[in-house]
Image (cartoon, grey):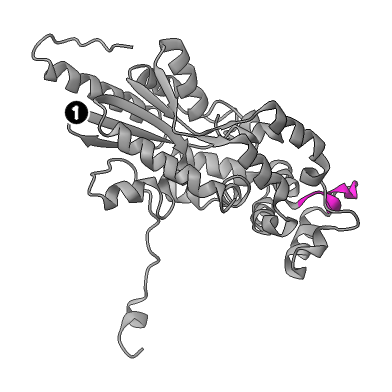
Amino acid sequence: MFSAICLQSAAPQSAMAQTPQEPEATTVDEVVVLARRSGAPMWTVTRGDSTLILVGAITGIPRDLEWRPDDLEAAAARSQLILTPQVGRASVTDLLRVVWRIRTISRMPRGQTSADYLEPEWQTRLEAVMAGERNQDWRSKSLLILGFDLMQDKAGYTGRRGGDDAMDVINRAARRARVQTRPVGTVRGDELISSLIDAPQSAHVPCVQAAIAAAEEGPEAARDRAADWRARRVPEVVASPIDKALNECWPWGDPEIAPQLHQQWAAAIETALISPGVTMGVAPIRLLAEAGGVLDGLEARGFDVVGPEWRAEPPAVDEVDSEPGV
């Protein structure tokens, strides 16, 4: 469980020696073309001599998914700076608190089950999903742990155990090319641990409900999500049952931690847009593309955000229904 506390966790050469501006422009273009060719959803924002490339990542990519990580790695290696997701700074004391309170984190209060917290409709749906389970231990697991188990065991979500994702590729490129990396922020370990230990079971009800919905889709939920990601169907990824569940579960679903994560990304992007050269940022795609997320914020401030459409098209309205008085 404590592994979840890590929130995810070169001078370019120019072929033309003309004016200083021309090689720089060529370099930026090359980086952008490489990144786009990889197939990963990405957006570019330019202000003056600053270019920001935002790559939308998902975890849990099936190992047999075909995309072009080598191109993304090459693009990352040509960047001047790479922004990575937040990290949790945990002390030995924080780790010991997890060990001491592991039962609180992983189990229901004694004598209680999921039926004590879920409405009958949701409990019935959960019973249906778990109908084939011989071991009934799931009934007394904490709702948070149950939610993650449902995503992994029933909806096919492999988390960090999946194939290489965009975060893995970009981090590897940074190590190999010795590109400077910078987490967009940190979250104090004691805050993370407190939010995990002190939250009542009722706080995790939205998480387990979303996980039940993902589990009902079966293992194809993960494959469909990955296929949408590769095809850059961004609204479909954000609306996928797995991403909805991840957004409801700790830490992203925590009402105190989540705002910190969003604010830190906004501040890091502001800094990147006044830094010359190419900055590449890799972030969970839902953080970038959700309603009111990073991309909406950039567009609201007047920036030209270039990349795949990230907003779902509004549902078609029947012309007859839209007529006044109908």
> Relative to 254, is 124 on the left or the right?
right
User: Is 263 situated above or below 208?
Assistant: above
Question: Bounds of the magenta span?
Answer: 135-142
* Quadrant position of residue 103: top right
Identify the image quadrant of the C terminus. Answer: bottom left
Residue 77 placement (x, y as % from top left): 38, 17
Q: Which of 214 and 256 is in front in this view?
A: 256
Q: Nearer the viewer, residue 274 or 131?
A: 274
> Relative to 110, is 272 on the left or the right?
left
**Residue under pointer 1:** 49
Q: Residue 137 colored magenta?
A: yes
Other-residue count near label 1 (Cα within 10 Å), few / some / many at <14 / 14–19 / ≥20 = some
> Relative to 27, is 151 on the left or the right?
right
Q: Helix, strand or loop at disc 1?
A: loop
- Residue at figure coordinates x 24%, y 25% from the top left: 276
Residue 251 placement (x, y as % from top left): 60, 44
Q: Is residue 137 visible?
A: yes
> Relative to 250, is 16 on the left or the right?
left
Residue 281 placement (x, y as % from top left): 39, 31
User: Is 92 situated above or below 135?
Assistant: above
Which is the main secondary structure of the residues drawn in magenta? helix
Identify the image quadrant of the N terminus. Answer: top right
User: Is 292 situated above or below 37?
Assistant: below
Q: Residue furthest bottom?
A: 325
* Quadrant position of residue 6: top right
Q: Is residue 233 visible?
A: no
- Residue at figure coordinates x 30%, y 84% from the top left: 323
